[in-house]
Image (spheres, rainbow, N blue to C red):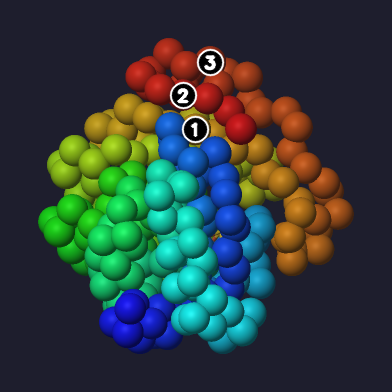
Amino acid sequence: MEALKSTIFNIPVAGIQPVTSIDFPGKLAAVIFTAGCPWNCRYCHNAALRFADNNANITPDTVESFLQSRAGFLDGVVISGGEPTLHSALPHLLTKIKKLGFATAIHTNGNFPEMIGLLLARNLVDFVAMDIKAPPRIYDRITRAHNTGIAVARSISLILSSKVDYEFRTTFHPHLLSEEELMDTIHAVYNSGGRRYYIQRFRCQGVYDEELAAAGDVVVLPEAVVKEARRIFDVFDVR
Ligand code: SF4
């Protein structure tokens, strides 16, 4: 397991969730949270994980023994973040996880299409859950980074042309996205070829942005958008 140790050592691990039944459809899975994300979304609920030095002192040995102890008991391992595709050692980590017999999933913002393409080409990932922040024209307003919509469009295209199991999902907060912009988002996903889509209500737990945190959880979603999403997507739900 030396290779696994050195690989994980290059990826800052900020947390391990021992089991989940909702992050990898149809599978009982563990989640490994990597630290580091180049974006700065106001609604980030993993805000503490945006910084790559936030590795919570989870050592390679801890991750290794955790994975070994779950082999044969869990179906899969999800790599979430932060942004896991930021890390160049991700293919090596996923290779090792697959060799232990797990199915693999990633949660991604789509900012690194080269890495996503590489993972797909090598069949290292069985399920991709990708955030769609906004319609392309205002993407940078949500991510507070530059040219993010271009990279995301490339990632969407790679995912859809690969036949990998996937979902796209958008977190909605009315202070950040208008009803019209959310409607434009679902149509942009549909027009790209996406057919499996979710709208997620903003939840304030873990959010650093004081204004959003103080406003509390979003309960109500724009009814017309939900109705339209139900009409156009093969798979759709709200969370
Ligand atoms: S892309 Fe995800 S992890 Fe990165 S800042 Fe936005 S919400 Fe947080």
The correct choice, above or below, for 26 with respect to 54 in the image is: above
- Does the residue at mark 2 contact the one at mark 1 (Cβ under 8 Å)? yes
Q: Earlier in the sequence, mark 3 or mark 2?
A: 3
Q: Quadrant of ligand 1?
A: bottom right
Judged left or right of residue 172, residue 167 is left
Judged left or right of residue 208, residue 165 is left
Three-letter residue code for mark 1: Tyr
Instruction: Determine the secondary structure under disc 3.
Output: helix
Q: Earlier in the sequence, mark 2 or mark 1?
A: 1
**Residue pictured at 61% horizontal, 84% vertical:** 57
Instruction: Looking at the picture, tell me which residue is in the foreground, 175 or 12.
Output: 12
Q: Quadrant of residue 11?
A: bottom left
Mark 1 lies on residue: 198
x, y percent for residue 138: 46, 52
Instruction: Looking at the picture, tell me which residue is in the foreground, 210 or 206.
Output: 206
Mark 3 Cα shell of 10 Å, populated few (<14), some (14-19), many (≥20): few
**Residue pictured at 51% horizontal, 66% vertical:** 66
Mark 2 lies on residue: 236
x, y percent for residue 81: 51, 64
The correct choice, above or below, for 53 with respect to 88 in the image is: below
